[in-house]
Amino acid sequence: MNQTVLTRAAVAVAGTALLVGGLTACGGDKADAGTTKADGGQGAPAKAHSSVEAVKASYLKTVAAGFAKAELSIVGADGKTIGQSGTKGWYPSSHDVILKSERPDTRSIMIADMTYTGMAEPRGGKSWMSMDLAKDGKPGVRLNDDPAEYLAMLLGQEKLTHVGTEKTADGIDAEHYKGSFAAADLLKADESTKVMEEANRTYLHEAVKHITTFEVDLWIGKDGYPVRADTVSTDARGTTRTTAKFSDFGKAAPVQAPPAEQVVSFEDMNKETDRKLKEADRTLQEADKKLRDAGLGGLDLDS
């Protein structure tokens, strides 16, 4: 996935009946497993585990949750690692996370196209800088690395296989799914399942069109929520490797913007910087004139 939140600094609530039916049918059983009747007779063979149905059920349940805790480690094409720790939300895309890198930790809040970055040194008593990521009034298109988004990319993907029931590296019992997809596959996400709102499906297809290959290992917990996704994504800029862990679905507090009185816009900060630079230039010009008038040669401002 991408790294827009650091260096450059998601539908409606659906019912969960499908989750109950889908996971009950799948239940982590092997395709060749059978059921045994009480009288010792052999019942009908168990229904094969469907990756498509499992992902669809998990997606619907995840969408209804709205928010979750997230821990991400992203190794970019440049080899540098960026961490995110906090809350992720979807539809609209949002986050309230601590960004971790070689630079000092920074708190970042995003709600749709508005981002707020915590400033180590307040400007005029304001500790947050806001930036509108919409371009020319049009909504920006980007990936959010949230659990609903990962599941959405896998909706209807027949190439996704069920590896089996296992524990994650963190000791969580889960169903493991694995797949490798080309650009054309990603652009067909949810075309067969049709569980996303049309606008959200269109947005997703637009957001992934730059990806040339996408590999994923996905683990869905016993409660039907995705608990981990390990991905390798390649585009024109190179390859990005992401490990994403999720928990506390529906329990995490919704993402909220900072108080308005604590926010200064990026545009206003630039205007203030320009004003101060012009003021400094005038001061230097005046000092230069005084020195020259005194026969002291001036400040050599042209050098």
Image (spheres, rainbow, N blue to C red):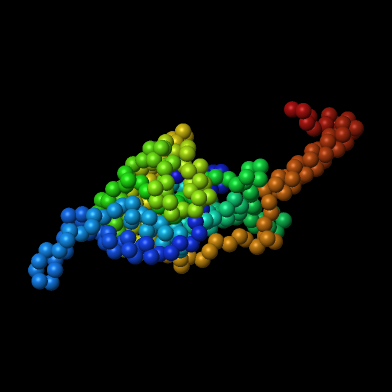
Residue at image coords 10%, 71%: 39
Q: Position of residue 216 (x, y in %)?
A: 35, 46
**Extreme residue toward the bottom, this view:** 38
Q: Is residue 90 visible?
A: no
Q: Is residue 147 above or below residue 215?
A: below
Q: Residue furthest left?
A: 40
- Residue furthest top as drawn: 303
Q: In which quarter of the image is the C terminus?
A: top right
**Above or below: residue 212 compared with residue 169:** above
Front residue of this view, candidates 187 and 9: 187
**Residue 279 or 7: which is nearer the viewer?**
7
Residue 294 in the image, given as x and y percentages of width and height: 89, 33
Whole-percent x, y for residue 148 in the image: 44, 55
Asked whether, in this view, residue 43 is left or right of residue 126, the answer is left
Residue located at (61% from left, 60% from top): 257
- For residue 263, above or below residue 280: below
Task: Give the residue at x 43% y 64%.
Answer: 15
